[in-house]
Image (cartoon, grey):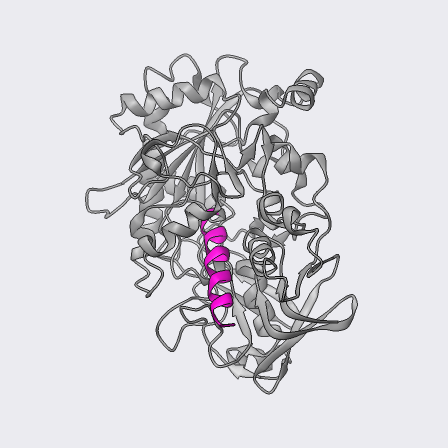
């Protein structure tokens, strides 16, 4: 099978690429995805995402033991389905702020360069104060249809604490609090597959190949020629192979294909095609701890899975099952020296512990605390044919301090007058740590991923970077990486939005190379 472009991974960026590249009827495009169709109810129903964890829709990764997290191995869900992680996530559309992109220092990737690509993607439903959002893109951005009563109390608590209210969350600066904008259309998840892939499926020049695991990129010398996969004969690319397999899959495939640190490749039994030592390095993730307290009133999501709520969702597209769980956010600075918010507080009107995999024992509410700009760095590596994920959490001391300060801020939220009718005592496993030492122990014993790995195929203008500013893999031809793995540093937000932006801009860069 021969195509002009072979895209690996039908996730947040891959679906964008498939749509934009196939707009030209004169080129042929293959989109290759290891997972299957995204037709399960729990994908469509916003509150159902945790039901997809550790199923066939999930890569179900486990990290290496983390020395600074009590030696724990952490569970990392990643989407293995059309739409990728945009079919499993909490639908939060949070771009980050201007500084996030300006700090990359890469020509063509400053905030003002990438803003048009965010706007191209967005179709804002409802208010659009200040023209922050795009208005006619394919990706619906809306408010929650049925926010919980405790979420309104959280927003009042933020006001009581003196945080500024954001007119719209996704502006140039985002110090302050806001309800969460979500990728939903009339109470239904709206993934990258919904926005980009489904409208493109009727095109005869687009082939979507599911249930096929790509094993490596093939080369003729140093030119990428296609991919080998689990489904039979190789798929050949006349023009380019584009990896959009995410912060784990893309560096893993590069290394399995012979592009990476030579010593590591040889140790894994992989012939070296091109030595590129930074492949898999610079891995970053948003680490999160939380404060969980009992709710004095039976109004939370703990009883959301009732027959009545299911019928309300199926018939009216409203009610508790339209929740994304993270219903409101506040971006704060733990010290005046921080140039931008370094902590995100996420409010959940339920006990969000253990990734939602453990059924709640009662009514509770949660303020999650997210470290936005970790100093720690990890890696994606090889152990023979297997992938090694070592995020290196908390290996840089400032990360612990910032999370401790964030937990103090979360505790202040629950101490406000606005939260008094709802916030009770600690709910297990949270045990109410008070001192800095106790809070640090809570972080080390219970912190988990917020599902935002990035950076492992770092983009840069320097020769040591994995990809150049046009997203071309250095030292080889006909091969690009277009996903969140190219981000030099994490955004102070969530990674679905920048992954879509990278897909939009990457498509333009690929098209420009044809002319």
Q: Nearer the viewer, residue 105 or 238?
A: 238
Report the residue at 70% width, 19% height from top.
Answer: 311
Return the x and y of residue 296 as percentages of the image width and height: 48, 13
In the image, the segment drawn in magenta is 497-515
Q: Nearer the viewer, residue 318 or 369?
A: 318
Return the x and y of residue 345 as percentages of the image width and height: 39, 35
Tell me: 269 left or right of 145: right
Tell me: 349 left or right of 50: left
Residue found at the far bottom of this picture: 221
The answer, for residue 77, to whether it is visible in the render is no
The answer, for residue 366, to whether it is visible in the render is yes
Report the residue at 50% width, 27% height from top.
Answer: 144
Quadrant position of residue 259 = bottom right
Q: Nearer the viewer, residue 381 or 473?
A: 473
Return the x and y of residue 257 as percentages of the image width and height: 61, 76
Residue found at the far right of this picture: 232
Q: Quadrant of the N terminus?
A: bottom right
How many numbered marks have been drawn onto this rendered protein structure? Answer: 0
Decide whether the magenta segment is chiefly helix, strand or loop. helix
The image shows residue 326, relative to residue 387, as above or below, that is above
Residue found at the far left of this picture: 336
Q: Is 498 a magenta residue?
A: yes
Report the residue at 58% width, 20% height from top.
Answer: 362
Q: Is 502 a magenta residue?
A: yes
Return the x and y of residue 216 as percentages of the image width and height: 66, 72
């Amino acid at each position: 099978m021969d195509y002009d472009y072979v895209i690996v991974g039908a996730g947040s960026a891959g679906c964008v690429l498939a749509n934009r590249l196939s707009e030209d009827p004169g080129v042929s495009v293959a989109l290759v995805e290891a997972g299957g169709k995204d037709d399960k109810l729990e994908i469509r129903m916003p509150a159902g995402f945790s039901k997809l964890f550790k199923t066939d829709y999930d890569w179900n990764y486990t990290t290496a033991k983390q020395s600074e997290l009590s030696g724990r191995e952490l569970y990392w869900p990643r989407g293995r389905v059309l739409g990728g992680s945009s079919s499993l996530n909490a639908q939060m559309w949070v771009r980050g702020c201007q500084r996030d992109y300006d700090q990359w220092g890469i020509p063509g990737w400053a905030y003002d360069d990438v803003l048009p690509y965010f706007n191209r993607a967005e179709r804002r439903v409802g208010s659009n104060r200040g023209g922050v959002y795009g208005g006619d893109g394919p990706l619906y951005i809306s408010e929650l249809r049925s926010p919980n009563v405790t979420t309104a109390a959280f927003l009042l608590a933020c006001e009581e604490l003196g945080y500024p209210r954001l007119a719209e969350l996704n502006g140039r600066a985002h110090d302050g609090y806001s309800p969460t904008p979500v990728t939903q259309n009339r109470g239904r998840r709206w993934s990258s597959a919904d926005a980009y892939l489904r409208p493109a499926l009727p095109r005869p020049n687009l082939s979507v190949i599911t249930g096929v695991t790509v094993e490596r990129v093939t080369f003729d010398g140093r030119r990428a020629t296609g991919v080998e996969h689990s489904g039979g004969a190789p798929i050949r690319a006349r023009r380019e192979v584009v990896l959009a397999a995410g912060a784990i899959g893309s560096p893993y495939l590069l290394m399995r294909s012979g592009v990476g640190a030579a010593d590591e490749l040889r140790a894994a039994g992989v012939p070296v095609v091109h030595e590129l030592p930074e492949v898999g390095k610079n891995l970053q993730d948003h680490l999160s701890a939380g404060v969980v307290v009992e709710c004095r009133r039976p109004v939370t999501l703990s009883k959301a899975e009732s027959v009545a709520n299911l019928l309300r969702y199926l018939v009216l597209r409203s009610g508790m099952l339209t929740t994304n769980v993270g219903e409101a956010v506040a971006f704060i600075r733990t010290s005046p020296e921080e140039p931008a918010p370094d902590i995100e507080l996420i409010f959940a009107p339920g006990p969000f512990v253990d990734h939602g995999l453990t059924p709640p024992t009662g009514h509770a509410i949660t303020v999650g605390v997210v470290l936005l700009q970790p100093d720690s760095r990890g890696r994606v590596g090889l152990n023979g044919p297997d992938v090694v994920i070592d995020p290196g959490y908390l290996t840089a001391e400032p990360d612990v301090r910032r999370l401790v300060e964030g937990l103090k801020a979360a505790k202040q939220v629950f101490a406000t007058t606005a939260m008094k009718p709802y916030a009770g005592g600690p709910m297990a496993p949270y045990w109410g740590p008070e001192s800095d030492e106790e809070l640090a122990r809570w972080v080390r014993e219970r912190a988990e991923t917020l599902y935002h790995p990035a950076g492992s195929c770092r983009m840069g203008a320097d020769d040591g970077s994995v990809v150049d500013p046009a997203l071309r893999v250095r030292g080889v031809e006909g091969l690009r990486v277009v996903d969140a793995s190219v981000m030099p540093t994490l955004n102070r937000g969530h990674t679905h939005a920048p992954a879509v932006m990278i897909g939009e801009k990457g498509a333009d860069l690929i098209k420009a190379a044809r002319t």
